[in-house]
Image: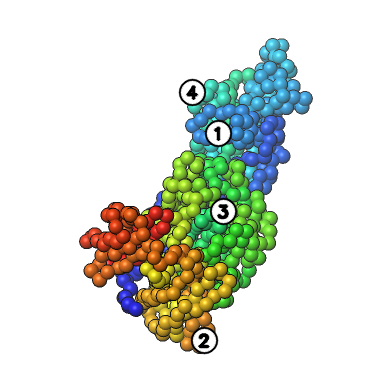
């Protein structure tokens, strides 16, 4: 057994960030959405805005002044498709509905020119400019007035606790100067007032179809902490027959506030697509000041890390979005979760063989590690938002008891994992996958960890700051999945900065097994131990029956890092599973995660041994073996191919230091050796 003193500097700085909040240690300038509406009603044509009720409630339309007998109307339909900013308008190309002004429906009113350019009514952002009475004899349809002055009004928006609010949307508009014009208005809870007169948008090659344009404006200070705010879009036109399309169309309305990351909440610690099938899981770590607790009730866990409503024009349709999401139920257990806790949520429909025993209440053992299936009653599910086919937000939802993995299932090619505040605001997330999979750059914090296909891969956090992509590793699942346990020694030390030292009998940093000639090498490390009597290594061929391999004394009570090393001298061939049982001085015990290893016959085993001179001797049953040296972040330090023969001695580069991993590949068999230099 070797005893190593913990390095303090990095973790003291990390702890300072945790206590002060992440925003004290890094600068992220961005906006995150607190309210939005995309006018998705599935209507192709002719749906009045007065009948539209979005995810936040019903919109309304009022006449600001007297209207003509055949005034133009506000509609919500895809007749003016809500395309991306800086592109031309189209007609229902992707069924992306928008709010727009068009002439009245046929059969309701005979507008002067409606029978010519739009007999059915609602032709997108195309309005009837009317016919002056003096020219009534020349009008094709009627002499009815199209004079319009109508405001489309949002539902009431509760901005309690919100400040520095920005309104963004995309729009197109032309009309006729101030005669036929679009105005943006704001309700402060008592009265409506003009907010701005947005400029006419370019037409260019779009012609009368118009070009979608981004718009952004700060709300007045009276909106801060105001529970009764509304926004309004007002269109006015006279009846002089002069004017050009487009009238006005609006889509993707969002209210945002400055994004200021902090540390109080659950961040993504590990997410795996599993070795095959849907053997997936997500593990979060609870961040906050050391020895504190966090209220996790109603916090959200999901895939799709913020491409949906995380700032203007971030639409990523079909970018790995599973419909709906899950959240922590509003139960007492989640009201005060200790910082440093690990919470593992897994797919109960396709079990990963490495999953530890269920411990949904952190009761067996009490180690600040919660293990629960996605369908646990301690979780809830929303089956409606966000949508898998159109963008959407995290709105008030009729939550159902028990979660469902289908609401957060990870796409193998590319997807994301995230956590959100109970009100739907983004907290933390990572993404992965090739550009060809329509993936995003990693959400609001650009946390895109990998650009490769993630079939059979896992992403895990190492140390220092979970809001920096370089602190995450993407790797194959073999030997890298650690559900319900820390990811590696560095991750365990980071966790130790969050935990109360008195809460755990031991803080297990890692537990690994490796082929070592005719034996199996067993290695584990602890960051702290309290009243720890001894360890027992147990072995199973089927995860059902377990036998004792060996026992070894613990360190009693210690605040130092301890490394343990032992051998199973009589292993059997095939797949074997190992686990570690820790027993206190009072006789109570706790189990570690389960790890597995594939054993071949001793005469045909690939293994590597760390020598006293710092090099590594590799014995391999093939003519040549490939090797690669990596650091704990997965970065390659050196690689090569052994010469012909059955043994080779590999020299570790002089500049390499710390904890290293040597990976050796011989045919279809691989072995990894941890090296501390």
In the figure, residue 76 lies in which quadrant?
A: top right
Viewer-side label of 3, 2 = 3
The kind of secondary structure element at disc 2 is loop
Q: Residue furthest top?
A: 138
In the figure, residue 374 lies in which quadrant?
A: bottom right
Viewer-side label of 3, 1 = 3
Q: Nearer the viewer, residue 285 or 406?
A: 406
Mark 1 surroundings: few (<14), some (14-19) or many (≥20) residues within 10 A: many
Which residue position is annotated with label 2? 587
Q: Mark 3 and mark 2 in contact? Answer it, CB < 8 Å.
A: no
* Disc with the residue nearer the chain's start (3 vs 1): 1
On the image, the x and y values in percent for residue 344 come to 54, 64
As drawn, 273 above or below 110: below
Q: Seen in the image, is 87 located left or right of residue 148?
A: left
Which residue position is annotated with label 1? 83
Viewer-side label of 1, 2 = 2
Q: Mark 4 and mark 3 in contact? Answer it, CB < 8 Å.
A: no
Q: CA distance from mark 1 to mark 2?
A: 66 Å
Q: CA distance from mark 1 to mark 4?
A: 16 Å
Which residue position is annotated with label 4? 204
């Amino acid at each position: 057994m070797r005893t190593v003193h913990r390095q303090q500097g990095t973790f003291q700085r990390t702890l300072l960030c945790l206590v002060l909040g992440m925003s004290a240690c890094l600068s992220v300038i961005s906006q995150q959405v607190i309210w939005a509406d995309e006018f998705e009603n599935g209507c192709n044509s002719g749906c009045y805005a007065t009948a539209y009720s979005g995810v936040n409630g019903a919109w309304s339309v009022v006449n600001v002044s007297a209207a003509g007998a055949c005034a133009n109307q506000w509609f919500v339909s895809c007749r003016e498709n809500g395309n991306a900013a800086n592109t031309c308008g189209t007609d229902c190309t992707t069924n992306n509905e928008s709010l727009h002004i068009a002439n009245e429906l046929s059969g309701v009113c005979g507008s002067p020119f409606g029978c010519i350019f739009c007999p059915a009514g609602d032709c997108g952002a195309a309005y009837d400019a009317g016919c002056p009475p003096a020219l009534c004899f020349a009008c094709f349809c009627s002499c009815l007035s199209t004079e319009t002055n109508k405001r489309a009004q949002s539902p009431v928006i509760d901005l309690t606790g919100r400040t520095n609010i920005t309104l963004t949307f995309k729009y197109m508009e032309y009309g006729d100067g101030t005669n036929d014009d679009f105005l943006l208005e704001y309700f402060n809870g008592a009265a409506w007032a003009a907010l701005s007169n947005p400029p006419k948008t370019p037409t260019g090659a779009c012609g009368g179809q118009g070009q979608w344009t981004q718009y952004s404006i700060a709300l007045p200070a009276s909106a801060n902490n105001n529970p009764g705010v509304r926004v309004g879009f007002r269109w006015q036109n006279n009846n002089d027959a002069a004017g050009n399309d487009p009238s006005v169309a609006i889509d993707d309305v969002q209210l945002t506030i400055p994004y200021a990351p902090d540390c109080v909440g659950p961040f993504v610690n590990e997410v795996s697509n599993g070795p095959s099938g849907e053997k997936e899981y997500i593990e979060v770590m609870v961040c906050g000041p050391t020895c504190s607790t966090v209220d996790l009730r109603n916090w959200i866990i999901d895939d799709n890390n913020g491409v949906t409503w995380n700032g203007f024009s971030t639409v990523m349709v079909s970018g790995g979005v599973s419909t709906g999401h899950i959240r922590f139920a509003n139960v007492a257990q989640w009201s005060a979760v200790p910082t440093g806790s690990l919470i593992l949520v897994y797919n109960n429909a396709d079990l990963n063989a490495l999953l530890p025993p269920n411990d949904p209440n952190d009761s067996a053992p009490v180690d600040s590690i919660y293990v629960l299936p996605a369908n646990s009653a301690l979780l809830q599910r929303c089956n409606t938002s966000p949508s898998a086919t159109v963008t959407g937000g995290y709105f008030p939802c009729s939550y159902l008891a028990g979660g469902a993995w289908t609401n957060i299932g990870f796409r193998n090619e590319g997807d994301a994992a995230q956590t959100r505040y109970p009100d739907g605001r983004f907290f933390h997330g990572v993404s992965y996958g090739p550009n060809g999979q329509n993936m995003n750059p990693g959400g609001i914090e650009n946390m895109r960890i990998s650009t490769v296909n993630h079939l059979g891969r896992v992403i895990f956090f190492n140390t220092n700051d979970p809001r920096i992509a370089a602190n995450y590793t993407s790797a194959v699942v073999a030997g890298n999945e650690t559900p319900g346990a820390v990811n590696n020694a560095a991750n365990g030390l980071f966790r130790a900065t969050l935990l109360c030292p008195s809460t755990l009998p031991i803080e297990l940093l890692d537990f690994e097994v490796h082929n070592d000639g005719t034996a199996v090498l067993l290695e584990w490390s602890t960051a702290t131990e309290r009243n720890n009597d001894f360890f027992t290594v147990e072995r199973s061929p089927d995860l059902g029956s377990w036998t004792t391999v060996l026992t070894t004394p613990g360190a009693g009570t210690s605040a130092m890092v301890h490394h343990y090393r032992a051998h199973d001298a009589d292993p059997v061939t095939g797949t074997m599973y190992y686990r570690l049982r820790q027993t206190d001085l009072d006789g109570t015990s706790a189990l570690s995660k389960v790890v597995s290893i594939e054993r071949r016959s001793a005469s045909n085993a690939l293994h590597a041994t760390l020598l006293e001179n710092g090099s590594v001797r590799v014995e391999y049953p093939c003519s040549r073996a490939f090797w690669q040296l990596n650091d704990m972040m997965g970065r390659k330090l050196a690689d090569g191919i052994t010469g012909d023969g059955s043994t080779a001695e590999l020299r570790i580069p002089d500049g390499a230091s710390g904890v290293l991993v040597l990976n050796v590949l011989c045919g279809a068999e691989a072995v990894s050796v941890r090296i501390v230099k």
